[in-house]
Image (spheres, rainbow, N blue to C red):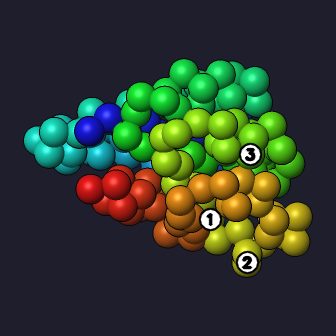
Amino acid sequence: MKLIIINGPNLNLLGKREPEVYGSQTFEDYLYILMKEYQTKKIELEYFQSNGEGELIDKIHEVGFSYDGIILNAGAYTHTSIAIADAISAITTPVIEVHISNVHKRESFRHHSYLSPNVEGIIIGFGLKGYKLAIESFL
Ligand code: DQA
C-alpha cells in the first residue's frame, strides 16, 4: 500500500513553531518513528512538505491517480484554498484531512475548511498522533 503525507505551509517548523499549540517534536523525528513502525506492514510511506499552494496542488495531481491514500494537512490553506479543494475533487485517491491542533477551539477563521466536503474523513486535535490515526484508517 502506497501512502503519502502531504504537509502544507509552516509545518516544516514543527518542533519550533508555537510548541504550546503544535508540540515540541519535529516532524522528521515523528516521521522516522512512523516509518519504522509501518515498514514491516508492507506500507510505503512517503512525505512531502511545501509552503506553496501550487506545489501542493502539483503533488496532489502527481500522486492522486496511483497512490492508495493521501494524508493531507494543508495548514492555513485549509481555510482559504478553493484550488486545493478542487484538486482533491479532481483525483481518485482518497484523502484524509489532518489537523494537529483542535481548530474548533481556536480562532473562528480556523473553523471553516474548504477541503472537508471533498475528503473521506477528518482527524482533528490529536497532535501528531493524528497522522498515525490517518494511516490506520487506510488499513
Ligand atoms: C493546522 C491548523 C491550521 O489552522 C494552521 O494554519 C496550521 C496547522 C493544524 O495542524 O492544526 O498551519 O492545520
Q: Residue shown at 66%/55% (left/top)?
A: 118
- Mark 3 and mark 2: span between their CA atoms? 23 Å
Quick check: 99 left or right of 103? left
Q: What element carries label 1?
A: loop
> Quick one: label 1 or label 3, which is nearer the N terminus?
3
Q: Which amino acid does label 1 sit on?
A: Ser
Q: Is mark 2 on a helix, strand or loop?
A: helix
Quick check: 73 left or right of 131? right
- Mark 2 and mark 1: span between their CA atoms? 8 Å
Q: Mark 3 points at which residue?
A: 85
Quick check: 127 left or right of 22? left
- Mark 1 and mark 3: span between their CA atoms? 20 Å
Kindly check if marks 1 and 3 are in contact, taking CB atoms under 8 A apart as contact. Answer: no
Answer yes or no: is residue 15 visible: no
Q: Residue shown at 80%/69% (left/top)?
A: 111
Q: What element carries label 3?
A: helix
**Residue 98 x %, y %:** 56, 57
- Packing grade of label 2 (10 A; few <14, some 14-19, many >=20) is few
Q: Residue 101 carries which label?
A: 1
> Quick one: label 3 or label 2, which is nearer the N terminus?
3
| Image quarter (top left, top right, bottom left or bottom right) of the C terminus | bottom left
Kindly check if marks 2 and 1 are in contact, taking CB atoms under 8 A apart as contact. Answer: yes
Pointer 1 residue Cβ closer than 8 Å to ligand 1: yes
